[in-house]
């Protein structure tokens, strides 16, 4: 049974949704060529490069003050750059230790609050590990904890979309089916689809045009057409083995079929953000954008 009515999904964060006029390409974090490694300087460099978005990286903790966040928001508005944020890595909503679950919720909340002040529309995070628990039990725990997070955010009038990410290892919660189901059950939640992670966790599948289309079709069927009009995607080269993800690679060193992926994006008319996580972030982000625009 759904915890929230799906009919309200399209109304959540509708100001962000209205502004998604196309698929925007950008970097995971500050571009390497930025004159300073600050969020404000990174936004300026993204604009100079002709990219459209940037993901703020809170992966090692939220270390941005409220004052700085307001400055970042102003810089992004002035530059016309759309922002999202990636929450801390240290999140596990299925920990065996209750205090770690509580701390995980707090980290998501803190990331969402600062992201909101920055003007970011979404906060991405890796939700949980299985720890040999049944998948259904882990799904229920993730849903219950995100319901608590959403209640606190709604009390604070914060409408940032929470985005559990598809993950790169089968030991992690985060298949395409799982992130869609969480999004179905919790209002204010939509997936972050990391297509390179899907490729890695399957040890080489999810690498053809038909497979990419199948993922987009799953989103549309599970969450409605509006879910394809406010996407948050991750794309990069990736190294993997039988146990899944090893490390991110530049596109030119990997077997990931990004051209077929971009063709699927174009054919489905997706809108939102496509964030490049390659080690050479802006170089590959520009490759992705230029190829997509050529289609």
Image (cartoon, grey):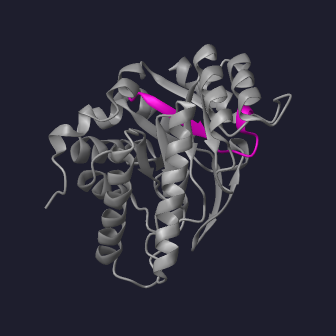
Who's the residue at 65% across and 21% down the image? Answer: 75
Residue nearest the viewer, comparing 215 with 125: 125
Look at the picture and state if 51 lies above or below 58: above
Residue nearest the viewer, comparing 19 with 39: 39
Look at the picture and state if 27 lies above or below 215: above
Looking at the image, residue 185 sits to the left or right of residue 66; the answer is: left
On whether residue 275 falls in the magenta region, the answer is: yes
Q: State the residue lying farthest toward the right.
A: 35
Res 190 visible: no
Q: Position of residue 10 (x, y in %)?
A: 25, 34
Who's the residue at 42% across and 27% down the image? Answer: 266
Who's the residue at 57% across and 18% down the image? Answer: 77
Q: Position of residue 207 (x, y in %)?
A: 49, 50
Q: Which residues are magenta?
A: 270-283
Who's the residue at 72% across and 21% down the image? Answer: 44
Looking at the image, residue 266 sits to the left or right of residue 44; the answer is: left
Look at the picture and state if 165 lies above or below 121: below
Q: Quadrant of residue 282?
A: top right
Res 208 visible: yes
Looking at the image, residue 218 sits to the left or right of residue 243; the answer is: left
């Amino acid at each position: 049974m759904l915890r929230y009515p799906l009919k309200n999904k399209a109304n959540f964060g509708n100001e962000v949704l209205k502004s998604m006029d196309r698929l925007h390409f950008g970097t995971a974090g500050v571009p390497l060529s930025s004159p300073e490694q600050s969020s404000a300087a990174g936004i300026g460099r993204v604009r100079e490069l002709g990219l459209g978005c940037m993901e703020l990286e809170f992966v090692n903790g939220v270390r941005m003050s409220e004052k700085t966040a307001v400055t970042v928001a102003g810089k992004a508005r002035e530059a016309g750059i759309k922002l999202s944020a990636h929450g801390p890595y240290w999140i596990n909503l299925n920990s065996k230790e209750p205090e770690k679950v509580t701390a995980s919720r707090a980290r998501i909340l803190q990331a969402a609050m600062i992201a909101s002040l920055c003007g970011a529309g979404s906060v991405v995070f890796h939700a949980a590990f299985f720890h040999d628990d049944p998948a259904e039990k882990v799904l229920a725990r993730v849903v219950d904890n995100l319901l608590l997070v959403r209640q606190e955010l709604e009390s604070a009038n914060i409408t940032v979309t929470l985005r559990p990410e598809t993950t790169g290892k089968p030991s992690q919660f985060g298949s395409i089916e799982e992130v869609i189901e969480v999004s179905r059950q919790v209002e204010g939640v939509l997936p972050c689809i990391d297509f390179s992670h899907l490729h890695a966790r399957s040890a080489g599948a999810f690498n053809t045009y038909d497979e990419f289309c199948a993922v987009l079709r799953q989103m549309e069927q599970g969450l409605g057409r509006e879910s394809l009009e406010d996407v948050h995607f991750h794309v990069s080269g990736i190294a993997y083995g039988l146990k899944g993800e090893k490390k991110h690679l530049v596109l030119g060193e990997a077997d990931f079929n990004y051209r077929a992926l971009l063709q699927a994006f174009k054919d489905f008319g997706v809108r939102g953000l496509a964030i490049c996580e390659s080690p050479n972030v802006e170089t590959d982000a520009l490759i992705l954008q230029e190829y997509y625009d050529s289609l």
